[in-house]
Amino acid sequence: MSDLQAQQRVASRKSKKIKIIGDTTKVYYTYLSNPTERLLVDSSLYEFEEVNATWNERKWYVSLTGLLATPSFDLVYQPELKGGFRVGLDQFKLYQLGRNDIKYYQIKDNRPYTDLYYSQINQKNNFVKADFAHKFSENFYLALQYSLANQTGFFSHQRLRNQNVGATLRFLSNDFKYHGYLNFFTNAIKHENNGGVLQDTVIGLGTDFLANVNVNSTTAQTQYNLTEVSYTHFLYNNKTDSIKAKTAATNEWSHRITYQFNRYKFFDKLPPTNGAIYGIAYVNPRGIRQFIRHQLLENELSFRQALGGSLTSAPLWVKAYVRHSWNAVYQEPITFDIHNITAGLIAQNNPQFKFKYRLEGRLTWAERQLDFFAKGRVGYDLGVLGYLEGSALFQRYQPSLIDRQLYVSWDQIWDNNLSFKQVQEINFGGTYTYKLDRKNWGLDFKGEVLNHTLSNWIYYDSSQVHQATESVNILQVKAQGNFRIWKLNLDNQVIWQPVLAGEEYVRLPELLLKHNLYFQSYIFKRAMLAKVGVLFYYHTPYKADGYAPLTGAFYNQNSFTTSIDPRLDFYASFRIWQFRFFARAENLLYFVYERNYATAYRHPVTNFVVRFGISWRLFD
């Protein structure tokens, strides 16, 4: 499970604690990773207007040139669980649909459910998303998920089309002991890579001006396709006695078989000869090409046992699993197979208890070495005094395939299989959460202190990949405070993250600020909920990474430092029953500074734009 998926689940769980001013029709959903845990769909206006490329699910990241679904990287360091064989090429991962992202909706009276969403800057830069779910009977459930990001951009040769399609069919036996899930999803991405503009600062008004700015390439393109089919089934030991009384399950057997097909292709028919994009990978003036085909066949068997009650009420449940993964890889021009064997153990209690914990460990035999991680979190509900939690993660994992070896146009560019060591991460920290809700005022506060130590860190420069010879240490102090007085709200987030050691390997802004001041109230005799506000973003200047389209990597550079320009947006959003709408004016301070700030080296965002979006939930 990716870090993005883990963060989404944590945010979804915590959304229950937020006062949701939604319509009266409550819709719940579950994930395949834990079918017994129900989550509530948020239909309020809380962060509904947040459809920009720097803020998603309360996580800071930036996308190339500020366009949705383009290559992206974190502005705030976030550890990710890794282990076993990985191709790499993760620049689009935040917008890809995965098996663990599919929601299984639960609607009262088993009515069909449709959730539609659309937003756009203009007809050439838009985003659409649709979910459909219908439980045809007590036995069969069908769901479809679709999303499409279609971005032409404002600079030359940066068009992107990122499409996700998912379908699932669920079967439940009459006694509810057997659950079967057949899942299919596919991701298709086409991205034109211009290699960045030729100058560090772009000054000028009007989007027509931007289209004529010189770029490094007008012929480079990335194509990525992923298709996965899986079948997951569960067997529970729940019982029904002679008087039809049901006993909740205390254990669960599950098995999953997965087939995945990945196809990655990068090509440039007329590569620039100055080495600005490809460096040592400029091996053929007639064209640059990288092609990888990766097939995965995976089987996983698991057993989960509740101790002291059912799976939904016990103070403790334990899950053990084993997994075999067969990877068939064609990295042009070579072919090879890799087998991974994984074993893991999870222990967790259910969320209704004051003392909460989750412990997890995993071992993976991967290509002549053992990857592993051990992680845990322990928390205690202090009642009116708040919630206190501590967490830790220790892991070692091998570098990705792209980090270890690269072939371009049939020539080998680097081979680090023998020289690169396992990456090691030690992450730990604590969190305190406090909430106070009164009739005319309220406060939500969350504070975090985290520390990350990274050894043998993998990083890129403009031409090749390296492994750090010294450890990297990052301190993070985060504070999030949301204040409400009458109908006025002020949501704030402040992050301080100094890189205490290894700044030459990891480049991050030291201070990040986000403030959202808004007025929210019912109008028109409580027929409509309205929200009007301003958003302010700022981070301190830093040497923002460049982007290498050939490897999909963000690399260190020393010739450019981002400007100190803050960002100011104005928005208005409304909800009438199950229909929501927002309009947002972005980057208002462009008219003050009259220059385009960059998210990555020589990848500036556009000028002032207006974005709008709608969401509509339909039943029956």
Image (cartoon, rainbow, N blue to C red):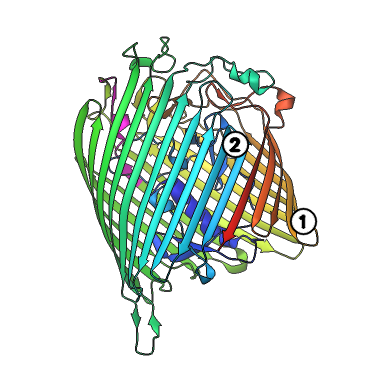
Residue 390 shown left or right of residue 366 in the figure: right
Query: Outermost residue, bottom direction?
Result: 243
Q: Is residue 381 above or below residue 184?
A: below
Q: Is residue 118 visible?
A: yes
The three-letter code of the residue at mark 2 reads Leu
Q: Is residue 155 above or below residue 97?
A: above
Q: Residue at x 42, y 70 (%)?
A: 137
Q: Is residue 398 magenta?
A: yes
The three-letter code of the residue at mark 1 reads Lys
Name the spot of residue 267 as percent of width and height, x first.
37, 22
Chain-order first, disc 2 or disc 1: 1
The residue lying toward the viewer, choosing from 442 and 273, is 273
Give the residue number, with chain letter if any, for mark 2.
Answer: 511
At mark 2, the secondary structure is strand
Name the spot of residue 202 as percent of width and height, x first.
62, 18
Q: Which residues are magenta?
A: 395-410
Name the spot of residue 84 as percent of width and height, x first.
28, 43
Name the spot of residue 101 as percent of width and height, x first.
44, 52
* Quarter where residue 316 is shown: bottom left
Give the residue number, with chain letter if any, for mark 1.
Answer: 487
